[in-house]
Image (cartoon, helix red, strand yellow):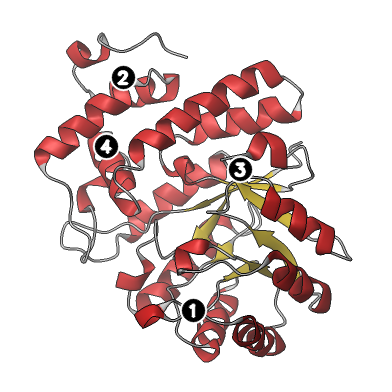
Amino acid sequence: MSTVNLLARNCTLFTTTKALDEDAYRESLQRFVDFKVGPFLASGGSGEANSLSWDEVRRVYQIGVEVCRGKVPVYANMPEVRSAQEAIDFSRLAIEAGVDIVNLYGPASLHGYRPTDGELTAYFDEVLTAIKHPVTLAPNPIQGYTAKAGLIADLCNRYPQVESVTLNGLDGDAYFIDLKDGLTRDVGMNVPLAGSLHTLGLGATGLSCNQINFIPRTVRHYVDCYERGDLAVANQIYADLHRFNRFVEQWRGARWQKMALKVFKLPGGEGGLRKPYLMPTDAEVERFTTGLLALGLVEIDELARAAGLGQGVLVQQAPAR
């Protein structure tokens, strides 16, 4: 049985008229359940949460709980917030829906705002005093700043409802080690793919990897190989995932994920992105598809065949790994 939690910020899916596509969303979440992946619901990036209404965020939480609760851990993310009260309100919405854990960011960096250590501590003190439900803290630099490891460790030590810290966007080992050194109690550490061969060995308890929205079996295989000590294969898959990530990062955020869902005819692919995102041009989609197929990943090849993509493209690939 796996001891590493596999997590991902899952896509929110829309119909062609840009309404929330509940049926496709359920299918997408079921893929997470099938591969034993815990979803972060209503994430600001992959989940396009800042384009969702309050009622849509509630519905995303409710559907996530309906499909996943009791099978995999259900994490609630939320749109970027401007204040502690907004974070509290979204947290309560998620808790009412029945999620297992609430993911907490700091306040958004709006109009150049960068919180001081005192302001950030006061923000989390207010939120964590109001919310006693299990939470994970996310010092993600995509917010526009990075909370110091010592500050996050202090919050973990003082608030027992903090069950883990999620370190997406923080590549390398230094932050992980500094945070771990500052902890006085056991707190889970969810790490990104980058550097995970080190951080899993250093005691990370979870892997948060958005590639799961498209190639869940490959990521699951990476974790399984690592856990059973098959490091030669784990290293090869890690390299493949790194190449994949380096390629798709040309289309940051939800763009590459929605293109992949559309091209490979996965649930919700036809609905695409919701504004302010726009789907890339046909030429970009073609370049994206050709580049993915050229990576030679077995799971991508299989998805291409299932989607009926032309064999003329497939034969040009590098040998499958």
> What amino acid is labelled 3 in the image?
Lys
Label 3 CA crowd tier, 10 Å (few <14, some 14–19, many 20+): some
The answer to whether the residues at label 3 and label 1 have Cβ atoms under 8 Å apart is no
Tell me the residue that label 4 is attached to.
Answer: 265
Question: Can I make out residue 317 in this image?
Answer: yes
Q: Where residue 228 appears, x then y in whole percent?
A: 76, 25
Query: Could you tell which of marks 1 and 4 lies nearer the N-terminus?
Result: 1
Which residue is rendered at x = 26% and y = 46% of the image? 269
> What amino acid is labelled 4 in the image?
Lys
Residue 114 numbered mark, or none:
1
Q: Where residue 56 appears, x then y in whole percent?
A: 36, 74
SS at circle 4: loop
Q: Is residue 18 left or right of residue 45?
A: left
SS at circle 1: loop
Residue 294 numbered mark, or none:
2
Query: Could you tell which of marks 4 and 2 lies nearer the N-terminus?
Result: 4
Which residue is rendered at x = 45% and y = 85% of the image? 82
Which residue is rendered at x = 30% and y = 60% of the image? 21
> What amino acid is labelled 1 in the image?
Arg
Label 1 CA crowd tier, 10 Å (few <14, some 14–19, many 20+): some
Tell me the residue that label 3 is attached to.
Answer: 36
The answer to whether the residues at label 3 and label 4 have Cβ atoms under 8 Å apart is no
Q: Is residue 229 left or right of residue 321?
A: right
Query: Could you tell which of marks 3 and 1 lies nearer the N-terminus?
Result: 3
Residue 221 numbered mark, or none:
none
SS at circle 3: loop
SS at circle 2: helix
